[in-house]
């Protein structure tokens, strides 16, 4: 397919350059410690929420680059949307309602991005945002929002010092 795109002058898909970063985000979000050690629900929703949390940190870091971050941030978001569409289809949701589900997921991602962007510098606010988003306001006894918040702040700090080009290439720390 890439051959045809090149042959007819479409060129490479710029989103492809962000796939390593998105893969790194998903890899961190799927680490068992979130679920077994910190009480994040090991469910479809819980896993989505962890991807959204780590993706939010990456998008906030990319935004810090100003104009240079605009296109990569948009492309990374598109990679996320493409992945979510694939996940929705994989669990058996048909074409008729894929758009509705995808719309809800994109809206949820936007809300989480806004919440984490506002709260990342305030430990108490971040814990509150995590309670609302990761545990949907109902944390069980195994939930450890303080630990999750601490680890997310650590990841954000690590990303803040990674050179921009290396971050885009998939290096988070």
Image (cartoon, rainbow, N blue to C red):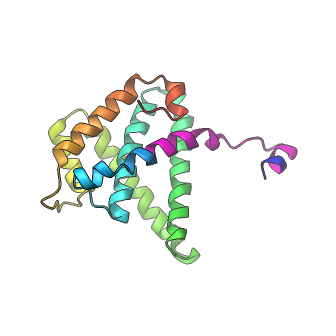
Whether residue 145 is visible: yes
Position in image of residue 49 (x %, y %): 34, 55
Position in image of residue 145 (x %, y %): 18, 48
> Outermost residue toward the left?
141
Which residue is rendered at x = 39% and y = 53% of the image?
109
Whether residue 67 is visible: no
Q: Indicate whether 113 appears above or below 39.
A: above
Position in image of residue 101 (x %, y %): 46, 68
- Name the quarter where the C terminus is drawn: top left
Which residue is rendered at x = 31% and y = 61% of the image?
42
The region drawn magenta spans 4-25
Question: In the rendered structure, does residue 69 fall within the stretch colored magenta?
Answer: no
Which residue is rendered at x = 53% and y = 33% of the image?
168
Counting the numbered discs, the total is: 0
**102 or 39, which lies in front?**
39
Which residue is rendered at x = 65% and y = 40% of the image?
14
Position in image of residue 160 (x %, y %): 38, 26
Question: In the rendered structure, does residue 19 fall within the stretch colored magenta?
Answer: yes
**150 or 69, which lies in front?**
150
Quadrant in which residue 152 is drawn: top left
């Amino acid at each position: 397919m890439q051959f045809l795109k090149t042959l007819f002058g479409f060129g490479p898909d710029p989103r492809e350059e962000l796939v390593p970063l998105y893969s790194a985000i998903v890899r961190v979000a799927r680490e068992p410690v979130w679920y077994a050690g910190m009480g994040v629900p090991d469910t479809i929703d819980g896993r989505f929420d962890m991807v959204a949390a780590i993706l939010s940190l990456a998008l906030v870091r990319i935004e810090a680059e100003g104009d240079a971050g605009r296109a990569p941030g948009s492309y990374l978001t598109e990679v996320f949307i493409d992945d979510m569409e694939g996940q929705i289809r994989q669990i058996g949701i048909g074409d008729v309602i894929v758009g509705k589900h995808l719309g809800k997921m994109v809206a949820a991602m936007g809300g989480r991005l806004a919440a984490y962007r506002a709260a990342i510098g305030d430990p108490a606010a971040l814990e509150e945002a995590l309670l609302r988003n990761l545990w949907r306001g109902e944390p069980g006894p195994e939930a450890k929002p303080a630990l999750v918040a601490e680890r997310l702040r650590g990841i954000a700090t690590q990303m803040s010092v990674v050179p921009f080009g290396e971050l885009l290439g998939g290096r988070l720390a």
